[in-house]
Amino acid sequence: MLQLVIPARNAADSFSRREWMRVGAIGLGGLTLPQLLSQQARAKPTTKTGKAKSVIIFGLLGGPPQHDTWDPKPDAPLEVRGPFGTIQTRTPGFRVGELMPLTAGLTDKLAVLRAVVTNDNAHSSSGYQMFTGVPHAPLNVESATPKAPNNWPSLAAMVRYLRPAAGQLPSSVVLPEHIWNDGNFPWPGQDAGLLGRKHNPWLIHCDPSNAKFKIDALAAPDEVPTTRLTERRGLLEQINHRLNAAGSTGGFETHDASVQKAFELVSSGAARTAFDIESEPEKVRDRYGRSRFAQSCLLARRLVEAGVSLVQINWTRIPNRENQGGWDTHAKHNESAKGFLMPMMDRAFSALVTDLEVRGLLDETLVVWFGEFGRTPKFNGNGGRDHWGHVFSLALAGGGIRGGVVYGSSDKNAAYPADGRVEPRDLIATVLHCLGFGGDAELRDAENRPFPASRGNVISAIV
């Protein structure tokens, strides 16, 4: 529940400067809403003309299999191709795995990359590269934690830096939780890193599939009526004036701007409307599926409609399922793929793309389907496929992407690139291009030192 921690008026003069700095803190998942809503830095002008106003990252974290999705190998031995067949898509000559029947009907809107490479077989470090475009140093480090030198900003943070929020919502949102390895080791590359904490994307821990779903931090407590909230805001302004008169630096001015933004969110209905997923027709919610991930996809569409520039949806664990309900299928790969992973993915992804198109949003919304790596060409002794960053597939739709395109290819076993190799930095450059920024857009770290958002190349074959 949201709390506004304001000291009593008659105790004001006895508080230290540190205690004054705590005033206005609004709790949200261990962070403060003012921190999460820090004022964005201004972007440098750009001559790029990307079509996308928003991007939705459809993240199948854990490592979706290339063999069962975008790059099946029907002529390979059974121990490579697996038991599943292929189906014809809407694009002549392009076949995908048979477990993607709904998505197969949308390939005229998709561009598929079949030769993506990180050369990293660890979730944490390969994931860091996918989110930032920069290889982790060193590669193949599992349970890596966010720290220098691996503190390049995530794509979500870059977008928040480059495109300040125009409305009541922040420009970059991540849901329904952060990405972590067993033991709650958060992956590096999920925050603003070098840009500074004020550019962190807004992380929302939530479950939109829950019948009681709501974002408590977007509403004042019942015991705080509007008039009282207004009084508290006035008191905060007096506090800020006192601190400024005492010689506070620009750092506090940023904090102050964030607090003001937080008050605007709480007092405005814009955010609450965006998160009111219960207002969606039941048939629309059913079309996506009722899982936590699927309803997060629907919520992402609502946030894009409300003006959010980037929404990242993270796949989360599912209790009482093989492999913890995730894509890290070290055992019973086929059972997991057919039993729930592929049906849930196919349903939610196709619903999201179709919903955006029906609402006239697909041309201006880029959707990126991806994981941190793929799966091994051969099954292991437990009937699973292990980590494989040497070649894998991903797909993009909308937002200026050419549909019906397959770029790159892998070898006969989907083990290594054959041609059209793509690295994560190229993906980052392409997404930034589609959003209207050059892949080499300039960022500035917390010390005001310039650095490029990406050193990759725009994948011209798909834009």
Image (cartoon, grey):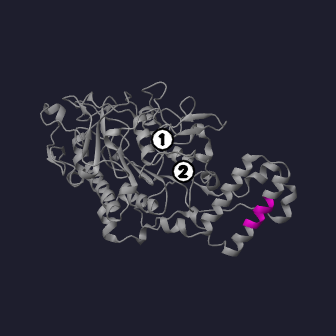
**Residue 236 is covered by the magenta coloring:** yes
Q: How many marks?
A: 2
* Dot 1 crowding, Cα within 10 Å, few <14, some 14–19, many 20+: many
**Which mark, by number, is residue 438?**
1
Q: Residue furthest front?
A: 47
Q: Quadrant of the N terminus?
A: bottom right
Can you see residue 220? no
Q: Mark 2 or mark 1, which has the lower sequence index?
A: 2
Q: In the depicted view, which residue is nearer to us: 174 or 52?
A: 52
Q: Residue furthest top?
A: 138
When the figure is inspected, residue 123 is found, relative to residue 268, above or below; the finding is above
Q: Where residue 171 sits in the image (x, y, percent)? A: 53, 54
Q: Which span is picked out in magenta?
A: 233-239
Residue position for label 2:
163
Give the amino acid type for the residue marked by disc 2 in the picture.
Arg
From the viewer's perspective, is 269 left or right of 326? right
Give the amino acid type for the residue marked by disc 1 in the picture.
Gly
